[in-house]
Image (cartoon, rainbow, N blue to C red):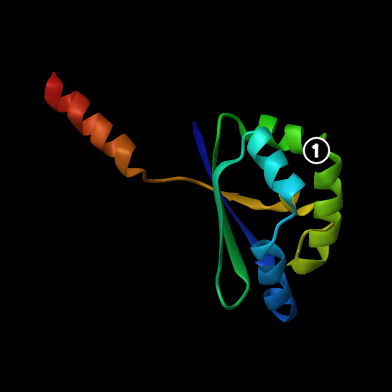
Amino acid sequence: MQRVCFQLQVRPDRLEEYKRRHAAVWPDMVQALHETGWHNYSLFLRPDGLLIGYLETPSLDRARAGMAARDVNERWQAEMAGFFEDLGAAAPDEGFLELEEIFHLEDQLEALNNTEAK
């Protein structure tokens, strides 16, 4: 399972509306995310608008492609695009900055246990 962490910047003047929109995401959008492999998906928002997202998926490329094929995603991305800074022409789900994972406790524990077992 691929773990993905990403960041975006929400416009400071749109923070409250952004939070309201995510308190009631469209049911068909929620279902589409689930069906296309966006698991354990969370968004975290700092008061200055820094948005951090996290998800687990068998393949980010397949999860993105699956959502790109859904009409609901096209509508959602169009509505959300105005909330973000520095996207250029990209949709939010394509324009985020993916962060490099440098530590995962379970991976470290597994490596340690494998070393000890030898």
Left or right: residue 45 compared with residue 29: left
SS type, badge 1: helix
Residue occupying image coordinates x 31% and y 38%: 106
**Considering only vertical position in the picture, is 47 above or below 76?**
below
Left or right: residue 59 versus residue 116 is right
Q: Position of residue 91 (x, y in %)?
A: 80, 52
Q: Position of residue 33 (x, y in %)?
A: 68, 41
Q: Is residue 89 visible?
A: no
Quadrant location, the C terminus: top left
Residue 43 in sight from this viewpoint: yes
Pick the residue in front: 92 or 70.
70
Q: Residues within 10 Å of mark 1 (few under 14, many from 20)?
A: some
Residue placed farthest to the top in the image?
A: 118
Residue bearing mark 1: 68
Question: Measuring 67% from the left and 34% from the top, which residue is drawn there?
Answer: 35
Q: Position of residue 46 (x, y in %)?
A: 55, 72
Label 1 is placed on what type of residue? Ala
| Horizontal and vertical percent position of residue 115 | 18, 26
